[in-house]
Amino acid sequence: DAKTTQPTSMDCAEGRAANLPCNHSTISGNEYVYWYRQIHSQGPQYIIHGLKNNETNEMASLIITEDRKSSTLILPHATLRDTAVYYCIAYSYGGATNKLIFGTGTLLAVQP
Amino acid sequence: EPEVTQTPSHQVTQMGQEVILRCVPISNHLYFYWYRQILGQKVEFLVSFYNNEISEKSEIFDDQFSVERPDGSNFTLKIRSTKLEDSAMYFCATGPSNTGELFFGEGSRLTVL
C-alpha cells in the first residue's frame, strides 16, 4: 500500500475554502486516492475519491497532480461542522491488500 | 441512503467475559470489515471477510477474536475473553459500492472493566 503523508493539523476560517494537502509519492498505478473524515469518535465518513482526473461532488473537490504524487482536498465553504480528522488513503479495490489503511490524518479546525 | 448499522452502541463488560458485536451491512455488498480505534489513537484494521471466510487479518486479530455471518445478513465480531486493552470503538465497514467506496457504521463502544 502506498503511504500517504498529511499535515498533522490545519485551521480554516468559517466560510472560507479549506485546502487539505496529501503526498502519496509511491502510489501505484491502480491505486485510487480516497478521502474520509472522522467527526469526533463517529465512524469514518466517505468524502470523495479519484484516480487521476479531478473530481467534484456535493461535499468536496479533489485535485490530483498530473504525476499523481500529491493531491488536495478542497472544502469550498467550510462550516463549523466540518471540524474533523481528514484521512487521505491510497487504496485499490481488489488489490493485494483489499482494505483501507488509516494514518493519523489532518485535524481540521474550522474557526468561527 | 443505505447505511451500515451496528449494535450495541455501547457495551460495558467485565474482564474475561465474552462479547459479541453485531453489524448489519448494506445489502449487495460483498466485503465486510472490522476496525477498532482505541481512544486517541488511529483507526486500525482488524479483519476482512469475503465469500463467507476471512480474507485477511491483522496481528491484532488473535485467537480471542472471531467473525462470522451467522444468518447471511448480520456480520458479527466475537471477543472470547475480553481484556482491559480491548476497550475501544469497534467499527464495521462494508463495500464496495458501485463507485468503489466502503461505508462505515457508527461504531460500538466497548468498555472492559
Image: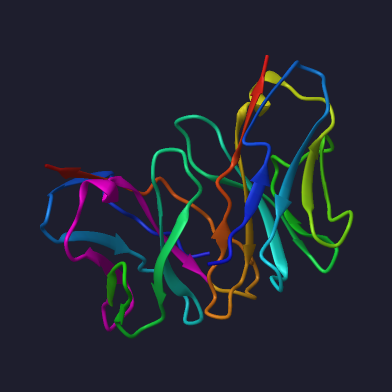
Question: Which residue is found at the position 41% from the left and 73% from the top?
Answer: A49
Residue A27 visible at all:
no
Query: Which of the image's four quarters has the C terminus of chain A?
Result: top left
In this image, B107 relative to A73: left or right? right
Question: Which residue is found at the position 33% from the left and 85% from the top?
Answer: A53
On whether residue A9 falls in the magenta region, the answer is no
Q: Position of residue A48 (x, y in %)?
A: 39, 70
Question: Which residue is found at the position 36% from the left and 83% from the top?
Answer: A52
Q: Position of residue B71 (x, y in %)?
A: 88, 57
Quadrant location of residue B15?
Answer: top right
In this image, B7 relative to B98: left or right? right
Q: Is residue B32 above or below residue A104?
A: below
Q: How many marks?
A: 0
Quadrant location of residue B28?
Answer: bottom right
Q: Is residue B9 above or below residue A1?
A: above
In this image, B29 relative to A24: left or right? right
Q: How is the image coloured?
A: rainbow
Q: Position of residue B65 (x, y in %)?
A: 80, 39
Residue that lies at the very extreme toward the right in this rendered image: B70
In the image shown, does A51 or A3 lie closer to the viewer? A51
Q: Position of residue A23 (x, y in %)?
A: 31, 63
In this image, A108 relative to B108: left or right? left
Residue A49 visible at all:
yes
Q: Which residues are magenta?
A: A64-91
Question: Which residue is found at the position 31% from the left and 67% from the top?
Answer: A59
In the image shown, does B60 or B91 lie closer to the viewer? B91
On whether residue A79 falls in the magenta region, the answer is yes
